[in-house]
Image: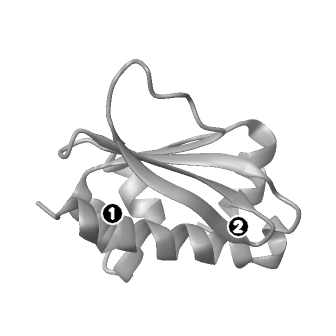
């Protein structure tokens, strides 16, 4: 199991890379990643080409629902962000779950 610090570093890079992609120009959305094995949710925003305000909070009913939500285990997150695991195969096997509105899904599908 990966540590929360490793996951935060991986997510900041991953979300930052997404935000900087020209296909997502002008996007201002809340994002979250639920780490199932750590019981934590990392929240932040994609805005103006950068990831902002990334912070971890304990998982629970009081955690607000983000516009773009990823659910995965910590080890799978590290494998995804390092390139060891492809997003398509992880999603197809149920190791990663991605939830977003239709417009956001269409924008993200080309990037993931």
Upstream in the sequence, badge 2 or badge 1? Answer: 1
The circle drawn on residue 25 is none
Label 2 neighbour load within 10 Å: few <14, some 14-19, many 20+ = few
Quadrant of the rendered image containing residue 84: bottom left
Answer with left or right where residue 103 lies relative to residue 87.
right
Answer with left or right where residue 70 lies relative to residue 48.
left
Residue shown at the point (62%, 62%) measured from the top left: 52
Q: Position of residue 65 (x, y in %)?
A: 56, 29
Q: Position of residue 82 (x, y in %)?
A: 35, 81
Residue shown at the point (33%, 63%) measured from the top left: 77
Q: Position of residue 79 (x, y in %)?
A: 29, 72
In the picture of the structure, the residue carrying the numbered disc 1 is 77
Q: CA distance from mark 2 to mark 1?
A: 19 Å
Residue shown at the point (33%, 24%) measured from the top left: 60
Quadrant of the rendered image containing residue 19: bottom right
Label 1 neighbour load within 10 Å: few <14, some 14-19, many 20+ = many
Answer with left or right where residue 110 lies relative to residue 5.
right
In the picture of the structure, the residue carrying the numbered disc 2 is 110
Pick the front one: 64 or 96: 64
- Judged from the image, the secondary structure of the residue bearing numbered disc 1 is helix
């Amino acid at each position: 199991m990966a540590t929360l610090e490793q996951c935060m570093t991986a997510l900041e890079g991953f979300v930052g890379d997404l935000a900087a992609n020209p296909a997502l120009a002008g996007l201002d959305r809340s994002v979250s990643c639920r780490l199932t094995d750590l019981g934590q949710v990392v929240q932040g925003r994609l805005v103006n080409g950068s990831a902002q305000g990334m912070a971890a909070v304990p998982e629970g009913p009081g955690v607000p629902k983000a516009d773009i939500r990823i659910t995965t285990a910590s080890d799978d997150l590290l494998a995804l962000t390092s390139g060891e695991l492809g997003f398509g195969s992880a999603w197809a096997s149920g190791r990663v779950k991605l939830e977003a509105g239709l417009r956001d899904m269409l924008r993200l599908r080309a990037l993931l």
